[in-house]
Image (tube, rainbow, N blue to C red):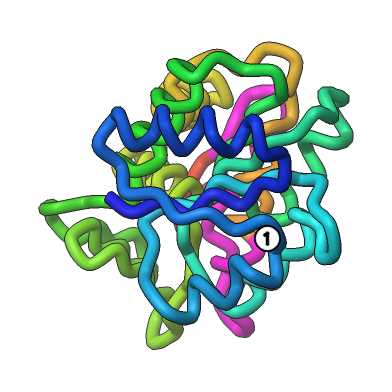
Amino acid sequence: MRVLLVEDDAALVKALVDGLATASFAVDHARTAERALELMGLAPYDLLILDLGLPGMAGLALTRKLRERQDTIPILMLTARATVPDRVAGLDAGADDYLTKPFALSELLARVRALLRRGTVVSGTVLRVGDLELDPARFEVRRGDTVVSLTAKEFAILEYLMRHSGELVTRSALLESCWDESYEGISNLVDVHVSRVRRKLDVSGRPPLLHTIRGAGFILGERAG
């Protein structure tokens, strides 16, 4: 697996490159977002580890740019900013996961492995709910004739919801299934991601499929309300 690390702290870069290499990842490094875009134009990457505070273009701006051009690469955002609004801003921009500095290398590696597992689906039956189709093997989602571009995290959320279509899915169930941990202190983490999925599924002229049941969770289905 090939990882692109975008970080300007030299000491942290050395520790992360060494740690990722020891864990059998191939790692390229960029000090700026602008250089990261150049490297991504030259070779494919399986994962982006991105610092929020960068010289020049900020990490949030790079994340938005990638998502605007429909790039679904999993993004793990690193930052020293630990407040909930800062975390939500990163997730809402399109990041798949968020790690606050300082952190243990073992935790970063665990999150990297989790994101890569979700971004690499080798088999599975095509799931259908109404005119919505999700193909796990092709990592492809369609609403009628419209291709829906999702990040790895959004894809994992939608796949879970589709496998439980017509059922009430709680926020806790999504956290346990799609994040591997409780994420205490970020109560609206699921809502941020589900809202992004809903916006992408809301194709003009077609009825909504993803519904929020206030105080309970979510239901995916044609007649849910």
Residue at the far bottom in the pictured view: 145
Residue for point 40% across, 49% down: 27
* Residue 207 falls inside the magenta stretch: yes
Residue on which the image places disc 1: 63
Residue for point 57% across, 25% down: 171
50 and 63: which one is in front? 50
In the rendered image of this protein, does residue 119 appear above or below residue 19?
below
- Residue 103 visible in the shown view: yes
Query: Label 1 amino acid?
Result: Thr
How many marks the image carries: the answer is 1
* Left or right placement of residue 196 versus residue 117 in this view: right
Residue 42 horizontal/vertical position (percent): 43, 79
64 and 26: which one is in front? 26
* Left or right placement of residue 125 versus residue 62 in this view: left
Q: Give the range drawn in magenta.
A: 199-218
Residue 32 horizontal/vertical position (percent): 71, 61
Residue 20 horizontal/vertical position (percent): 38, 34
Secondary structure at numbered mark 1? helix
Residue 177 horizontal/vertical position (percent): 40, 27
88 and 187: which one is in front? 88
In the rendered image of this protein, does residue 49 appear above or below residue 223?
above
15 and 92: which one is in front? 15
